[in-house]
Image (cartoon, rainbow, N blue to C red):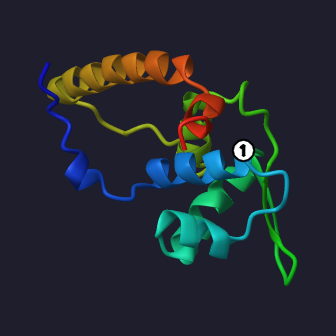
Amino acid sequence: MKSHLQFGYLGNTTFFVALKSLAILANSKELVTSITLTEKLGIESSFIRKVLAKLMQSQIVEGYSGRYGGYRLLTKPEETTLYDIYIGLINDTNNNAEPSKLDKTDKLILSILLESQEETEKILKKYTLSYISQHM
């Protein structure tokens, strides 16, 4: 089956960085610094901090600043689905507004996207962070 998803265009997306960072946290008993994550992932620490800040708001990660700071996973990897992480990244309290006017074509497109979202949700709920962390 040929994939139409072009992974080369995804690069270091927020979701990829979140999953890989959380997998490292899941495998660590200690606080993990953004410097350590940068070294292991080869991604700018400022981007990693931005991603983890979203997950802190979602109560998936806790972070401590300062000389002895770092990040720790708050959730159990075996109970945290990829969907939980995805929702943690996209939840935005300011993004609840419905479009004011939808024409017939808008409604059609929206229904297709919602169907796609439902399938994505089913798949992401099948996998846990523990599954990803075991393959790091």
Label total for image = 1
In the rendered image, residue 25, in percent from the top left (x then y), is placed at 71, 51
Q: Where does residue 48 sit, x and y in percent of width and height?
A: 57, 66
Residue situated furthest bottom in the rendering: 67
How many neighbours does mark 1 have within 10 angstroms: few (below 14), some (14-19), or many (20 or more)? many
Can you identify the residue that label 1 sits on? 26
Which residue shows up at 47% across the image and 47% down it? Answer: 15
Residue at the image position 85 percent from the left and 84 percent from the top: 67
Camera-side residue of 101 and 70: 70
Task: Please indicate whether residue 14 sits to the left or right of residue 113 in the image.
Answer: right
Kind of residue at badge 1: Ala
Looking at the rendered image, the quarter that the N terminus falls into is top left
Residue at 27% from the left image edge and 31% from the top image edge: 102
Give the left or right position of residue 29, taking residue 77 as reference.
Answer: right
Question: Where residue 66 sits in the image (x, y, percent)?
Answer: 84, 82
Asked which quadrant contains residue 46, the reply is bottom right
Q: Which residue is at the front of the view, 113 or 17?
A: 17
Q: Which residue is rendered at x = 45% and y = 19% of the image?
A: 123
* Residue 112 found in image quarter: top left
- Residue 10 vertical placement versus 66 (above, below): above
Q: Secondary structure at mark 1?
A: helix
Q: Quadrant of the C terminus?
A: top right
**On screen, residue 112 above or below 34:** above
Q: Position of residue 77 (x, y in %)?
A: 72, 33
User: Would you identify the image quadrant in which residue 51 lies?
Assistant: bottom right
Reply above or below: 38 against 86.
below
46 lies left or right of 122 = right
